[in-house]
Image (cartoon, rainbow, N blue to C red):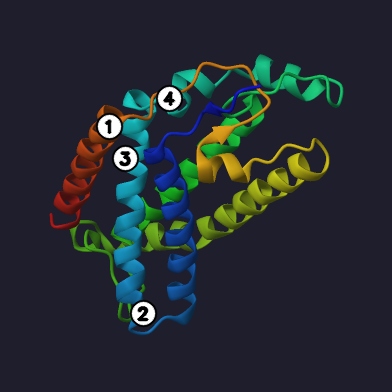
Amino acid sequence: MTPVRIWDLPTRLFHWTLALLVVFSVTTAKIGGNWMDWHMRSGYAVLTLLVFRLLWGFAGARYALFAQFVRGPRVVLDYLRAPRGAGERHAGHNPLGAWSVLALLAALLVQAGTGLFANDEIATEGPLSKLVSGATASLMTRIHSLNQNVIYALVALHLAAIAYYFFSKREDLVAPMITGVKRGIAAEPAHDDALTRARATVLALLAAGLVAYVVNL
């Protein structure tokens, strides 16, 4: 079958940039000290990417749209019950993978959002911590600390799913997210032209402006 363009460039850039920033955020948090300034900057960048992805989920290319890949519980159960190798090969996210993507995005959004209000009462405080009470800042800090374990678990699940599909189903999920192209499927290609990328640029700038505004409240 002819290779099909599935993942547009903005979606791929989002994916890999987010992955790098999450690793950087974790690393700088573990090192601490002066690196916490970079941890916070990384958090702002993560939040910008998440806002962009939310916008892109409604205004992006075909397979990036939430309406295209998010399915209800019944569809997910049917997918899980299907015999091994009998299920349809999905061009974008499969029904179960779609919900794991949403869960990871939600966990990262909680992490970035609570970080804005967090205060370790030592040397680092979020830019909005002074806008809330001490009790609220402490709660946000606690959630920020606990939620990192949720993110670790979801990332581990994400990596395990990639390995399962590669070794068990002989389906490489990584290469298409690098090249944008999937092989062996019959599907309508996603638009990945100059207009699509221009729209993504506008949305990315809008997301950056919104986050900058919030951070500087």
Q: Looking at the picture, how far across and down is residue 181, in whole percent?
A: 54, 34
How many residues crowd around disc 2 within 10 Å: few (fewer than 14), some, or many (20 or more)?
Answer: some
How many residues crowd around disc 1 within 10 Å: few (fewer than 14), some, or many (20 or more)?
Answer: few
Which residue does the numbered mark 4 point to in the structure image?
A: 65
Q: Are marks 1 and 3 in contact (CB under 8 Å)?
A: no
Number of marks in picture: 4
Indicate which label's residue lies in the foreground, 1 or 4. Answer: 1
Q: Looking at the picture, how far across and down is residue 103, in whole percent?
A: 54, 39
Q: Which is nearer the N-term, disc 1 or disc 3?
A: 3
Q: Residue at x 22, y 58 (%)?
A: 128
**How far, Cα to Cα, is label 1 from label 3?**
18 Å
Residue 192 appears in which quarter of the rendering? Answer: top left
How many residues crowd around disc 3 within 10 Å: few (fewer than 14), some, or many (20 or more)?
Answer: many
Q: Which is nearer the N-term, disc 2 or disc 4?
A: 2
Q: Which is nearer the N-term, disc 2 or disc 1?
A: 2
Checking the image for residue 215, the label placed there is none
Which residue does the numbered mark 2 point to in the structure image?
A: 35
Q: Name which residue type carries label 2.
A: Trp
Q: Name which residue type carries label 3.
A: Phe
Indicate which label's residue lies in the foreground, 2 or 1. Answer: 1
Q: Looking at the picture, how far across and down is residue 171, in whole percent?
A: 73, 37
Q: Which is nearer the N-term, disc 1 or disc 4?
A: 4
**How far, Cα to Cα, is label 3 from label 4?**
12 Å
Q: Name which residue type carries label 4.
A: Leu
Checking the image for residue 52, the label placed there is 3
Q: Is residue 31 above or below residue 51?
A: below
Q: Residue at x 19, y 56 (%)?
A: 215
Helix, strand or loop status at disc 2: helix
Q: Looking at the picture, how far across and down is residue 15, in whole percent?
A: 46, 46
Helix, strand or loop status at disc 4: loop
Q: Are marks 2 and 3 in contact (CB under 8 Å)?
A: no
Indicate which label's residue lies in the foreground, 2 or 4. Answer: 4
